[in-house]
Amino acid sequence: MQQKSGTFCVILITVGLFSMSSIPGFPSPVGAAERKITVQPSELPAIIKKAIEETFPQGRILKIQKEVEGEDPGQYDFDIRADGKEYEVEVSPEGKVIESKQVGPKTEVPEGNRKKKWTKFFDLENRKFASKGRNRFFILQPGYKLVLESRTERVVITVLKETKKIGDVVTRIVEEREEENGELKEVSRNFFAMCKKSGDVFYFGEEVDDYEDGKIVRHSGAWRADEENSQAGIIMPGTILLGARHYQEIAPNAQDRAEIISDDVTLKTPAGTFTNCIRVEETSGLDPDEKCYKTYAPGVGLIQDEDLLLTQYTKAKAAKNRKGNDKKDKRKK
């Protein structure tokens, strides 16, 4: 009997504790579960972005998370690199920097366990290419156009009617015009071709014109896959595999790489809200600190590049299976 009575008392005490924890203002014996989501720079509210820019004017954002459940819902947590040091920063929903602390170097993981690898061999000699076509996330049809904008920048991407032969491959020319505060900064002519069998879109090089005060001043970043120690890379695979990593360009001065880090993204842009998107993390084999994020929508293509968001896009007309529709690039090789 005493044992039963004791058990009954324990039950009453336990029930009482749980009941009291449900009373507003009474501390819960167990902390609230914390849940955070990853946020891209382009998704930050203006007040949050302003707080970071004022605190770290020359800083590079490495990671952003927003707390959606827990003790501080709505708070933004940043990892930032500035002046060769890394910081952890907390910003309130109202745009106030709550805490900023420098973090020491992380414990090194053995090289063999932490070094990522990217695919760089694509069996190019056994592939057959087309200068136009499309896969789920990349459209290579003449006339197709994308416009992406931020507060200060505007990029217009146009699939031209022109083609250019790189080695033995006839590629499609895609022009990118970049403006900053209304002033033309760069015009690049990118060379793409699609593998007929796999749907992979390959990047065969680019010509670049850098502008200052309306005049061409340099040609930084130009490369071609048919030059020495260079080869084409994949700009967009025909089959999307989460976690897949590949080189986009392979040249002594150009070694951009891509990793597919998400395949279920929903993103709101001025041109509309897009679902089932993929997010790509781009890095450089030449600069370990270089990193950026892009988002691609099915049936549309690029809709976000860092702070740039899609504002408009023009659907290309159905491709005509007629010879002589394309113009060959007459520029000297």
Image (cartoon, helix red, strand yellow):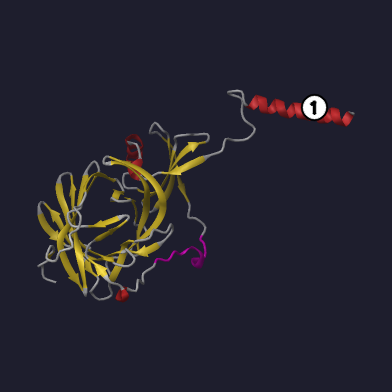
The x and y percentages for residue 205 are 23, 66
Quadrant for the C terminus, please. bottom left
Residue 248 shows in this picture: no
- Residue type at mark 1 is Cys
Residue drawn 85% across the image and 27% down it: 5
Q: Quadrant of residue 332?
A: bottom left
Extreme-front residue of the structure: 321
Q: Is residue 55 above or below residue 138?
A: above
Q: Quadrant of residue 116?
A: bottom left
Could you say which is closer to the camera, residue 26 or residue 265? 265
Give the residues drawn in magenta, as a range.
108-118
Give the side of residue 2 with respect to residue 72, left or right: right
User: Taken as a whole, is the magenta stretch helix, strand or loop?
Assistant: loop
The x and y percentages for residue 108 are 51, 60
* Mark 1 element type: helix
What residue does disc 1 label? 9
Could you say which is closer to the camera, residue 332 or residue 296? 296
